[in-house]
């Protein structure tokens, strides 16, 4: 995946995989002090898991090793994101559609193992909120 060059306006890649194991079990059993927590391999080993949970744990550890070898880390467990309540009309939180950019190809990895994955779409198919007449008004 990290060797695929971006072309033209393409600045993101998606790798859909069928993963074995129960990732939800890990998400439920990992202690998350706050909304986002980094989890080390040692902490992951300490979690008592079923056979399916152990399959998922092995996959996470394998992926973490690959990411660390590439220079990317850590493994984060995201309980939830803070909801932006300050400006409900134009939220800037990750619950709303937003733009992520990276000036360096493949410098950011988003890996979803449990729950809804991120949606990616071409900028040309999006509509900037500030250009919607009702919002501008």
Image: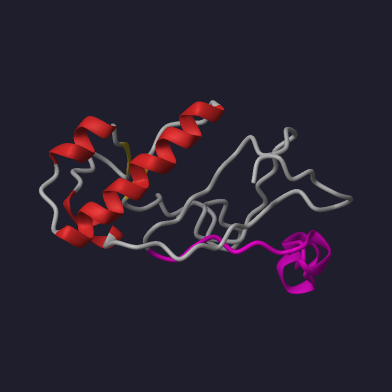
Residue 21 in which image quadrant: bottom left
The C terminus: image quadrant: bottom right
State left or right for residue 10 relative to residue 75.
right
State left or right for residue 64 relative to residue 110.
left
Give coordinates of residue 70: x percent, y percent: 55, 29
Which residue is located at x 76 percent, y 60 percent?
130
Frontmost residue, 79 versus 6 = 6
Residue interval drawn in magenta: 115-137
Which residue is located at x 41 percent, y 37 percent?
64
Give coordinates of residue 133: x percent, y percent: 79, 72
Q: Is residue 58 magenta?
A: no
State left or right for residue 8 relative to residue 132.
right
Which residue is located at x 85 percent, y 52 percent?
9
Q: Is 33 rendered above or below residue 136?
A: above
Frontmost residue, 54 versus 131 = 54
Residue 36 in which image quadrant: top left
Which residue is located at x 52 percent, y 52 percent?
93
Please identify the residue farthest to the left as the structure is shown: 48
Q: Is 81 rendered above or below residue 118?
A: above
Frontmost residue, 86 versus 13 = 13
Give coordinates of residue 27: x percent, y percent: 26, 54
Frontmost residue, 130 versus 117 = 117
Give coordinates of residue 61: x percent, y percent: 34, 40
Q: Is 133 rendered above or below residue 55?
A: below
Query: How many numbered marks are there?
Result: 0
């Amino acid at each position: 995946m990290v060797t695929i060059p971006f072309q033209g306006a393409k600045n993101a890649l998606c790798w859909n995989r069928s993963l074995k194991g129960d990732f939800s079990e890990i998400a439920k059993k990992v202690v998350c002090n706050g909304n986002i927590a980094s989890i080390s391999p040692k902490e992951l080993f300490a979690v008592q898991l079923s056979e399916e949970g152990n399959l998922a744990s092995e996959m996470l550890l394998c992926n973490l090793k690959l990411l660390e070898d590439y220079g990317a880390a850590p493994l984060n467990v995201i309980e939830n994101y803070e909801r932006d309540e300050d400006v409900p009309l134009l939220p800037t939180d990750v619950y709303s559609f937003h733009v992520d950019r990276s000036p360096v190809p493949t410098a950011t990895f988003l890996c979803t193992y449990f729950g809804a994955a991120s949606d990616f779409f071409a900028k040309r198919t999006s509509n900037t909120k500030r250009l919607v007449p009702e919002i501008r008004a």
